[in-house]
Image (tube, rainbow, N blue to C red):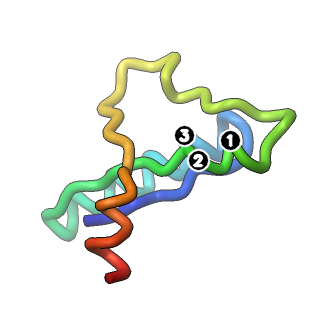
Amino acid sequence: MIIVKLAGGLRNQLFQYAFAREISSRMKTNFKLDATPFDIYYKHHKYSLSNFNIKQSFAKDSDFLDLYG
């Protein structure tokens, strides 16, 4: 599984999403989004991918435990 930590404005988020989607396709695995930085760090940027008709699956705490142990 690939977890992409989203950051920045809309262009950065779109790039990060597209990159994660392509890499997960090549590796034949799934990917999830981590949008927690928008709750914690970012005051000027918001999570913007919800405005598009794209596959959005968000990482849960258990996903991080599975990856990092």
Discs 3, 1 touching: Cβ within 8 Å: no
State left or right for residue 38 relative to residue 31: right
Label ID, residue 24: none
Which residue is farthest bottom? 69
Task: Say which of 67 and 61 sits in front.
Answer: 61
Mark 2 burial class by Cα count in 10 Å: few <14, some 14-19, many 20+: some
Discs 1, 2 touching: Cβ within 8 Å: yes
Mark 3 burial class by Cα count in 10 Å: few <14, some 14-19, many 20+: some
Q: Is residue 62 above or below residue 39?
A: below
Please provide percent x and percent y for residue 45.
77, 34
Residue drawn 17% across and 62% down? 29
Residue type at mark 1 is Phe
Mark 3 lies on a secondary structure that is helix
Label ID, residue 36: 2
Q: Nearer the viewer, mark 3 or mark 2?
A: 2
State left or right for residue 29 relative to residue 67: left
3D distance between C-alphas at marks 1 and 2: 5 Å
Residue type at mark 2 is Thr
Mark 1 lies on a secondary structure that is helix
Which residue is farthest right? 44
- The residue that label 3 is drawn on is 14
Residue type at mark 3 is Leu
Q: Quadrant of the C terminus?
A: bottom left
Residue drawn 31% across and 61% down? 63
Residue drawn 43% across and 48% down? 33
